[in-house]
Image (cartoon, rainbow, N blue to C red):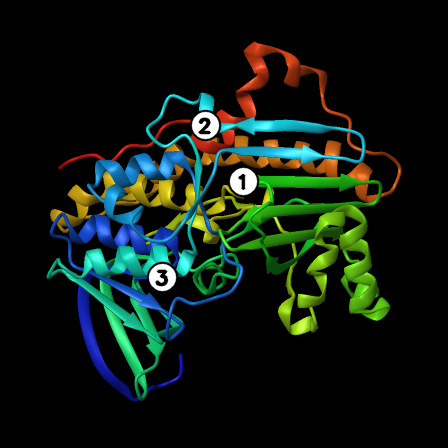
Amino acid sequence: MAIHDIVDVQTTDCCIVGGGPAGAVLAFLLARRGVKVMLLEAHKDFDRDFRGDTIHPSVMEIMEELGLSDRLLQLPHAKMRQIKIQTPETTTTLADFSHLKTRYPYITMLPQVKFLEFITQEAQQYPTFQLVMGANVQELIVEDGVIRGVRYRGGGGWHEIRAMLTVGADGRHSKLRQLGNFTAVETSPPMDVLWFRLPRQPEDAEGGMGRFASGHIVAMLDRGDEWQLAYVIPKGGYQQLRAEGLAALKTSVVEVVPELANRIEHLQDWSQVAFLSVESSLVQCWHRPGLLLIGDAAHVMSPVGGVGINYAIQDAVVAANVLTKPLQNHHVELKDLAKVQQQRELPTRIIQAFQTLIQKRVFAPILSSNSTFQPPAWLRLPILRDLPARLIALGVFPVHVDEC
């Protein structure tokens, strides 16, 4: 390790790297129980375009348990009560959340930046919480095979945070996953996604919708006064699409969603389009002595179903439930970290299997231009009709906040 001019050295009970949904919620949960926690975020603010903006009923119920749901819903948001798939021939309801037994029978469409600002502001009321923006973590502190904290650059130089536990919640391109030499098993989704926005008009349908045509898929998410659109392309097809030009993209979008013809000209430059290389992976072991991975750092999710933010928050809740007492007692063992993975790995595997099934059985044939969408027969069976809605909205197993 290079010798650095360390500006300062601080100590805390838990150092969380990554101020996304998993890191922010875990920091809040630990701080409210009196655990000293430092949340390190590499960026100077939370405002990134086209992050996951879908808060599912499972997370709204968690917010209710924390006494935060009413205040959260005071922020400007939209409600998605159904997900429909429309083809030139038919319209099919894939998921109807109104049938679910929950106080929140809808998906809350809320910009992630607003959610993160809300959670971190709530955490500020606890004296044991500290947020550091612009903290670019570069190194792990390793002593006798145990992770004892991190070193980061920011605020005029190098800083050292020494902690009983370090948590990597720094997303799909996790630095801590890399530094900790964790091994991830990757799958091969058949698609990538282009994200962009167009105005939404009062006469437009509400909620979320997938528009399928032979060779093309467009997902539409209701953001109140605008549509957030996902144009799904075959894996590796982005450079060819760029070469064909923006006009070709706009023509293709209008072919699938004709009612966008009167506003597609709002898309004027490639800078308005964000490219997402769709990935899906699962780290084999989420922990080392003194270090735990959660959220996308432990399992990168496909955007299918918009479940990523919700599984990350559920990871955070389970981590807080399991680790609060060990942190309060200043003694965190490897078995404690393993218990978090034991509770979260199976539901993660199940939802990733569901995403893979949708990608292979629905998306891949359509993108290859060999077929159009045919609604599966089981969607007409009452006993199975609510299954997609339950799986997307509530997850595999319910997660609740333990009161310690």
**x and y percent of residue 56 in the render?**
42, 38
**x and y percent of residue 34 in the render?**
11, 52
The residue identified by callout 3 is 19
Instruction: Tell me which label, 2 or 1, sits earlier in the chain.
Output: 1
- In front of the other: label 1 or label 3? 1
Element type where label 2 sits in the image? loop
Q: Nearer the viewer, residue 5 or 256?
A: 256
Q: CA distance from mark 3 to mark 2?
A: 25 Å
- Quarter assignment of residue 12: bottom left
How dense is the environment of label 3, judged by Cα within 10 Å: few (below 14), some, or many (20 and up)? many
Which of the numbered marks, if any, corresponds to residue 396?
2
**x and y percent of residue 296 in the render?**
48, 51
Taking the spot 52% from the left edge, 57% from the top edge, the residue there is 172
Q: CA distance from mark 1 to mark 3?
A: 28 Å
Q: Quadrant of the C terminus?
A: top left
| Picture layout, residue 60 above or below residue 164 | above
Taking the spot 43% from the left edge, 49% from the top edge, the residue there is 295
Q: Is residue 98 left or right of residue 227?
A: left
State whether residue 324 appears in this view: yes
The amino acid sitting under disc 2 is Val
Instruction: Tell me which label, 3 or 2, sits earlier in the chain.
Output: 3
The residue identified by callout 1 is 207
**x and y percent of residue 239 in the render?**
79, 66
